Amino acid sequence: MPLEVTPFDPSHPDFVGLASGIALAAPLAPDTARAIDEAMNQYAVLVFRGQPLTQDEQLAFARALGPLDLGFKRVARPHARLAYQELADISNVDESGQIADRAHRRIVGNLANQLWHSDSSFQQPSARYSMLHAVVVPEWGGATEFADMRAAWDALPARDKQDLEGLHAEHYALYSRFLLGDTDYNEDQRNALPPVQWPVVRTHAGSGRRHLFIGAHATHVVEQTVAEGRMLLMDLLEHATQRAFVYSHEWQPGDLVIWDNRCTLHRGRRHDLSARRELRRATTLDIDAADAFVEEPVRGAA
Ligand code: OGA
Ligand code: MN
């Protein structure tokens, strides 16, 4: 059966698609992978429901969509409950399988995920698709929200659009951690992922549409003073995350949600830290498979 996609949320008919017709646990045929790309370019968020996956199945599915990202794991690997480095453990569960203490090192990472962000925007290449799979979800809270950066760009007044052209923001992996008071990183960790610069306005390769590229990893605007740039970034974030541009996903176990980090921001929502919430994420890099070697030896370069 071919991939079928229908608008999921009547208030965001061109942003969120409900996808069905394929079994995610089965090997992904190349033409199905292409169909997913096409649907992603149209919608930016795809929701698959009722498809529980093992770690191996989730990883195989992700690999079929592109070379995989390690993201923040290149700075610190505090938690190795899952079998693969390429799977991010988006949970409040500790190494022994118990609900982690509030003071556990990993909880700050979950809290940082509650700031609007684009995964791995702090590295080059950054992330293309994130695929988050729900295993255990809490009764209260813990939704994930997605904001449409193409719609946010379209809705900006002409004067703002003009002012933004040519500006770049610097993105740094530890900025959001520092913001939350998590500063316990040594020099090697601080330098593991040097800051990168991205245009504040970019063109989405898959659709040709313009979009904002901002979020919690953006520290300042290169062409402006720190103060002016930070105010601009905060202002843009406020504009771009108005409810009109936001879809809120209420998780069910067995959901797999794919989002396009190029043209969306996302954030987790508050939940009871003492109630189990267990999801896992695989992420592709924003490069085509043929160029994957570009990713190789960044570390140690002068
Ligand atoms: C992520 C993320 C938010 C959440 O997995 O990249 O930001 O709701 N998750 O857990
Ligand atoms: Mn994230």
Image (tube, rainbow, N blue to C red):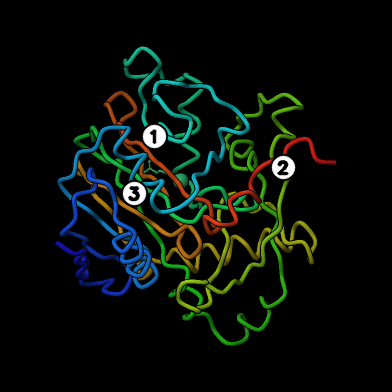
Mark nearest the camera among 3 and 1 is 1
The answer as to whether callout 1 falls within 8 Å of ligand 1 is: yes
**Residue at image point 38% right, 57% down:** 259
Sequence-earlier tag: 3 or 1: 1
Q: Is residue 58 left or right of residue 169?
A: left
> Mark 3 highlights which residue?
144
What separation in Å lies between label 3 and label 1 (alpha carbons)?
A: 12 Å
**Residue at image point 52% right, 80% down:** 156
94 or 300, nearer to the observer: 300
Q: Is residue 105 left or right of residue 145?
A: right
> Whole-percent x and y of residue 52?
19, 39
> Mark 2 highlights which residue?
298
The answer as to whether callout 2 falls within 8 Å of ligand 2 is: no
Give the position of the N terminus as an image quadrant: bottom left
The amino acid at mark 2 is Val
Residue sticking out furthest to the bottom: 158
Residue contact at pointers 2 and 1, CB within 8 angstroms: no
